[in-house]
């Protein structure tokens, strides 16, 4: 073998040895270097799906909430989260919170001790697309409309004006952009309970509209509304009542 051939062979071996050494060093560095540390934080979350209006008390806060470890990088820096369970006590949710979701400070509000005024009753009604006319939550003031079909026309009228919302429940579907059907609980006068009972007797559909701070009062007369409902019910009953039996001739 010529000296030139041996020299080239030695050069190749040296290069291969150097590459192998570099590879071993790279593998060693990867194996010995510590992976970047992910900063974890303890976050308070819901342990179940909680509807709008859920009230937190000392008795239920441990069942409704719990802590999980979550990467700090996954939480927006500007977020203001509820950090402790006692921060939720005597507060009420203003939005639906699903299992595993954390609580924003803006999502809860204080429970007013005077929310249910003396002499008021609590009643719940199903509403179509609850909240579709603006945000509805505990403490909202709303007008309740009722609608029924008479002949070929649909009649809609104000059933309850300017009532106080105590809680809202929605059959939420996260795959839909529009609010689902649900129910709304109100604080009402005893005489208004009668209106709702009569409206239910007519199979009325209910809708709610949020009142703005400066919304004018709607034209409303309780006695006329009551008389209207009774009149429609009497007409329907007279149409379906059996004809009186003729007396036998003596």
Image (tube, rainbow, N blue to C red):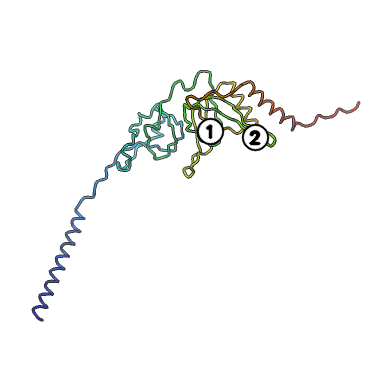
Q: Secondary structure at mark 1?
A: strand
Looking at the rendering, which quadrant does residue 203 occupy?
top right
The percent coordinates of residue 9 (x first, y second) are 13, 74
Label 1: how many Cα within 10 Å (few below 14, some 14–19, many 20+): many
The residue drawn where x is 62% and y is 29% is 199
Question: Eyeballing the image, is 3 above or below 181?
Answer: below
Check the image and name the residue furthest to the bottom. 1
What residue is disc 2 on?
A: 154
Q: Residue at x 64, y 22 (%)?
A: 224
Q: Residue 103 vs residue 26: left or right?
A: right
Q: Which residue is painted at 10% across and 77% down in the image?
A: 6
Question: In the rendered image of this protein, does residue 127 appear above or below residue 39?
Answer: above
Locate residue 198 relative to residue 108 in the image: left or right.
right
Image quadrant where one finds the N terminus: bottom left
Q: Which residue is mark 1?
A: 183
Element under disc 2: strand
Residue at image coords 29%, 39%: 41
Give the label on residue 38, or none.
Answer: none
State the residue lying farthest toward the right. Answer: 250
User: How many numbered tags mark residues here?
Assistant: 2
* Residue 53 placement (x, y as % from top left): 46, 31
């Amino acid at each position: 073998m010529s000296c030139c051939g041996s020299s080239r062979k030695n050069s190749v071996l040296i290069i291969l040895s150097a590459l192998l050494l570099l590879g071993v060093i790279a593998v060693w560095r990867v194996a010995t270097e510590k992976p970047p540390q992910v900063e974890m934080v303890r976050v308070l979350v819901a342990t179940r799906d909680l509807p709008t209006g859920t009230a937190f008390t000392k008795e239920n806060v441990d069942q409704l909430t719990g802590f999980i470890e979550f990467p700090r990088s996954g939480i927006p820096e500007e977020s203001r989260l509820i950090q402790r369970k006692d921060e939720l006590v005597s507060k009420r949710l203003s939005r639906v919170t699903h299992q595993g979701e954390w609580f924003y400070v803006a999502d809860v509000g204080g429970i007013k001790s005077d929310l249910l005024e003396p002499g008021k009753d609590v009643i719940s009604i199903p509403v179509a697309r609850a909240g579709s006319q603006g945000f509805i939550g505990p403490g909202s003031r709303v007008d309740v409309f009722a609608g029924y079909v008479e002949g070929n026309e649909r009649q809609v009228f104000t059933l309850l004006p300017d009532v106080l919302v105590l809680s809202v429940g929605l059959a939420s579907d996260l795959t839909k952009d529009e609010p689902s059907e649900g129910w709304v609980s109100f604080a009402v006068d005893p005489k208004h309970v009668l209106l709702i009972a009569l409206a239910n007797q007519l199979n009325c559909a209910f809708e709610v509209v949020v009142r703005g701070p400066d919304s004018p009062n709607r034209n409303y007369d309780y006695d006329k509304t009551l008389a209207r409902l009774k009149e429609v019910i009497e007409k329907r009953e007279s149409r379906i009542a059996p004809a009186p039996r003729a007396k036998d001739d003596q």
